Amino acid sequence: MKLKELLNNNTKLQAVTLTLYIIVSSAALYFSQKSVTAFLLVLASILLLYLTKFNNKVKWGIGLLVLVVILPFTASQGVAYESYMEVATFVGIYVAMAIGLNIVVGMAGLLDLGFVAFFAIGSYTYAIFATAQANNFLPDIFPLSGSWFWLFLIIGTLFAAIAGILLGIPVLRVKGDYLAIVTLGFGEIIRIVFNNLDKPINFTNGAMGIASIAPPSIFGFEFVQSSQFYFIVLGILLFVIFAVKRLEFSKIGRSWKAVRENEIAAQAMGIHLVRTKLMAFAVGASFSGAMGVVFAAKQTFIDPTSFTLLESITILVMVLLGGMGSVPGVILGAAVMTILNLQVLTEVTNWLGQLNMQGVISIPDALSPAKMQRMIFGLILVLFAIYRPQGLIPAKNPVFDEEKLKADDLNQNEEKVITAQQSVIDA
């Protein structure tokens, strides 16, 4: 306990500990390229950095150093490089979408079960025009080159934001369970529309999906590897985090929280409910739309099965697991769920499957690890819900020093009196 207190109160000791941890974990990943544990330990340094008492500028600087330089360099020394970057890229995509949903659910208190619809809108917006699909209803000038990807990031964002507003307009009068039902229906409608929009004019190629989507390019350089998409996703994610942190304690952010706590009281204080709710839907949807464009360009193939209700629920669970209304919590929740799904449970089930094939252990076919992976994932979520019901990092409101505020207010009043007296003397 004394060591913990010493570590919490000593910034220099925290700096030494964090530095040693980053060096050891990075060296482990550098020299053991197939070690999933080493890769996860390097990522965990971001969580340790968040728990330190450094100022925000120092935290951002160290975090960027780890994500932009240390992680890519140490992971690039072996054959597992692209698989590591694949996981890191999907972590970034889901973190950005979870942050967008956190605005709607965590800050504004509007339950949305159709959030993946905006992801689909962004994906199809780019996929249709980055392939020959658009030739079915426009002049024969498509596909657009990958250099248009950067413009479609903005277009996909705007289309998703407009869709968020269109969804918000009819559902402003409902809340709670009814809001969940309406948004769930919206998500399913979008998926079914894309699934059937291959006739009479073939917009989306229906259930067959759209293939051979042009990858992003800039100055003739194409982004085709996961290690290259990692930097695109990281750049967008940094913008998303910056924007949300600026919005959180702005006038609109405080309005979202007031509506979440009590709509009647918020309206009595002069908050425009319609505008506030529509803003939440639009901003949250826009982040999902941008990541939909990235997803389509990265996968080079999309179809309606990528945008099911399960995806919406998964993103909602990320928000609940991390802590509703907490930006750091949502980032951690999305990262934990994505890594569990894509890497940890996959590696564990493969390892158990190999042991079973070698006869080291005997597992019945009905209980094979591959079949039980989703059940294990569900049990882990249940444990998180039981022992961390408020989320991994619960939301915290800023704490102000009341005495300091009173002193500042008194000083301002004294300055006003002095200014008034000086004006009288000058007159």
Image: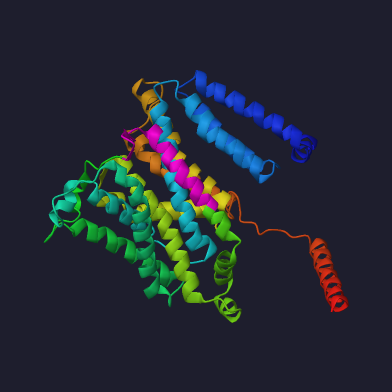
Please indicate whether residue 353 sits to the left or right of residue 412 in the image: left
- Relative vertical location of residue 245 with respect to residue 369 in this rendering, above or below: below
- 205 or 424: nearer the viewer: 424
* Start-end of magenta stretch: 216-242
Residue 141, position in %: x, y? 16, 49
- Residue 22, image quadrant: top right
**Which residue sits at x=42%, y=20%?**
78
Is 76 placed above or below 312 here?
Answer: above
Is 421 situated above or below 66? below
Q: Is residue 52 left or right of residue 299?
A: right
Residue 97 location in percent, x, y? 44, 52
The N terminus - image quarter: top right
Q: Residue furthest bottom?
A: 268
Decide: is 335 above or below 161: above
In this rendering, the count of numbered labels is: 0
Q: On the image, which quarter does residue 26 sit in?
A: top right
- In the image, residue 369 lies in the stretch drawn in magenta: no
The location of residue 401, given as percent across then percent down, is 78, 60
Q: Main secondary structure of the magenta part?
A: helix
Residue at far left of view: 200
Q: Position of residue 198 (x, y in %)?
A: 15, 56
| Residue 346 visible in image | no
As rendered, which of 204 and 345 lies closer to the eye? 204
